[in-house]
């Protein structure tokens, strides 16, 4: 995700994910132990889907 900025965005509709909003994350579980780098990992590996898009997929 080269265009990842500080605010995560929904991969479907492009809406910015707001704080406290339910969000669905598609990611691979880190191979390395420990979650101290989880923020960095999320920025590079996670794809977010907002709640509305997640529900509409079903
Ligand atoms: Zn969305």
Image: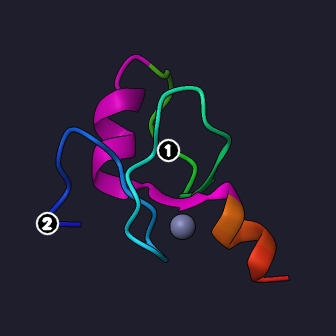
Quarter of the image for the N terminus: give it: bottom left
Instruction: Find residue 43 and report its horizontal and vertical position in percent.
Output: 30, 45
Magenta region includes residue 38: yes
Residue at point 68%, 41% (across, down): 22
To which quarter of the image does residue 3 belong?
bottom left
Quarter of the image for the C terminus: give it: bottom right
- Tell me where the magenta segment starts and ends, as one range: 36-51
Instruction: Find residue 30 and report its horizontal and vertical position in percent.
Output: 50, 44
Marks 1 and 2, how far apart in space? 19 Å
Q: Is residue 45 above or below residue 36?
A: below
Mark positioned earlier in the residue sequence (1 or 2): 2
Is residue 46 or residue 29 the one in the foreground? 46
Residue 1: image tag: none
Magenta region includes residue 34: no
To which quarter of the image does residue 50 belong?
bottom right
Task: Say left or right for 58 vs 9.
Answer: right
Is residue 10 or residue 35 the one in the foreground? 10
Query: What crowding class fits label 2: few (fewer than 14 Cα within 10 Å), some (14-19), or many (20 or more)?
Result: few
Instruction: Find residue 38 and report its horizontal and vertical position in percent.
Output: 41, 29
Name the residue tied to disc 1: 30
Residue at point 28%, 41% (across, down): 7
To which quarter of the image does residue 37 belong?
top left
Name the residue tied to disc 2: 2
């Amino acid at each position: 995700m080269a265009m990842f900025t500080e605010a995560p965005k929904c991969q479907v509709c492009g809406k910015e994910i707001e704080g406290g909003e339910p969000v669905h994350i598609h990611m691979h579980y880190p191979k390395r132990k420990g979650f101290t780098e989880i923020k960095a990992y999320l920025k590079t590996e996670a794809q977010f889907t907002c709640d509305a898009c997640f529900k509409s997929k079903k």
